[in-house]
Image (spheres, rainbow, N blue to C red):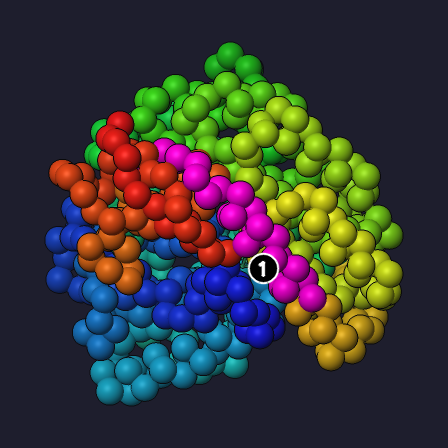
Amino acid sequence: MYNDNPTLEGISKEINEQQQGEVYFKAGNSTGSKHFYIESYGCQMNFSDSEIVGSILGEAGFQPTRNMEIADLILINTCSIREKAEDTVRRRLRIFDQVKRQRPGTLVGVLGCMAERLKSKFLEEEQLVDLVVGPDAYRDLPKLVGSAEEGQKGVNVFLSREETYADISPLRLDSNGVAAFISIMRGCDNMCSFCVVPFTRGRERSRNTFSIIAEATDLFERGYREVTLLGQNVDSYKWENPETQKVVNFAQLLEMVANVHPDLRIRFSTSHPKDITDEVLYTMARYENICKYIHLPVQSGNSRILELMNRTYSREWYMERVQRIYEIMPDCAISSDIIAGFCSETEAEHQETLSMMAYANYSMSYMFFYSERPGTVAARKYPDDIPLAVKKKRLQEIIDLQGQISHEVNQGDLGKTFKVLIEGSSKRSDADWKGRNSQNKMVVFPKKGNHQAGDYVYVKIHEATSATLLGEMISAH
Ligand code: 5AD
Ligand code: SF4
């Protein structure tokens, strides 16, 4: 419930969870006559999972469509992180119901975290849902779809300790052909007390290093120039080679991916403040193509609240990590996730979150107020006792401060020149390119010369808002 969030970052996050997360991939190797339509909500991991689902369905003879009205199978990949995200999914299901009434025989499937949380209850609650498939059961989709076609509703919410879909080559959905996600691990073992993810995505497991490198290499050869390594907690990546018993940690994985090609940019998300090591920071500093940007969610700036959240670090620990990042990489940008109004949070404790934001100088943040999730430790142990009006007031203060900080940080970029990877035409004007700098800031600049998406160019900044840098191309790479 953070739709009162007026920052651009907040809005784009909102759009992710709210809007039709409609996805489509250009016909790849799928030649079947049946069509599927898929919408994704929630985190990047969910969007990445939809690409795995696309690949599995492609193999089973389904073609993608952007038009749900011609689809034989309508899928929604869902998020449970806040109540609001679940409300959005329920609204979308009402729309799918109408399509289904017009075209009897159309199947509707619920995938992802909400499928995992509600399991077969979904089939009772939502009579028109035919399939409920959790994040570790996507390989079973063709079989479940087959049974559903025969009238047998299907549920598979089995959570695995091993599944990483390592061998599946994701079909790139709605891709700009420049930037892609690579999932490097699944699940989460952290047990933050507010969070439903350990229940919906299961235990943490890391994907085979070689399959990650192979995927990055393949993407580069197909023209992609940026990969984002995804996991709930990338710093705890750990894969043991069964032949040599050698263990690869996240810093080593980063280095291997960086070595795929100097023109392949590497990003990663999400880092956990308790786990991010100096080895990772030094590896980032050593490679120009590892982007100088770290998403390091603080959640709260107060040590007592952090303990209640079971974040396993203190305010001082977090500050030390921030200091170390800026020491090793003075040009690094840091962003955050922040929760306002967690159980029993006092006004003074909220003020510590504000002062932490100023200390860390976040380039941007995703900001939420606390939403109690059934089954979590917080829901069981701590009363959700901060009145909604107070949560909203604190959230607004956080949003306002972040707006100011982002504005100041971006003003500091005036006159600087950045290497920018062109992602495509700007949304506002076909005469402009848009792309990102290493710090993950969106840069918009007039087209000039003979460039295309996927090219690196140098852009000198002459104007900045709290969300975008505007500039002029000065020379090609
Ligand atoms: N209430 C509000 N925000 C939450 N998040 C996770 N769980 C909750 C919750 N119960 C936020 C955290 C997390 C981000 C993905 O969502 O800030 O980092
Ligand atoms: Fe939402 Fe978390 Fe599931 Fe991602 S992992 S879809 S953020 S509940």
Residue at image x 45%, y 52%? 464
Region of the chain picked out in magenta, as a range? 397-421
> Is the residue 354 above or below the residue 99 in the image?
above
Number of numbered discs on residues: 1
How packed is label 1: few (under 14 Cα within 10 Å), some, or many (20 or more)? many
Q: The C terminus lies in which quarter of the figure? A: top left
Q: Quadrant of the N terminus?
A: bottom right
Q: Amino acid at mark 1?
A: Gly
User: Residue placed at 24% from the left, 87% from the top?
Assistant: 102
Residue, x 64% and y 45% (percent of image)? 361
Secondary structure mostly seen in the magenta stretch = helix
Give percent across and percent down for residue 307. Answer: 83, 50
The image quadrant of residue 399 is: bottom right
Q: Residue at x 25, y 83 (%)?
A: 104
**Residue under label 1:** 403
Q: Nearer the viewer, residue 257 or 352?
A: 352
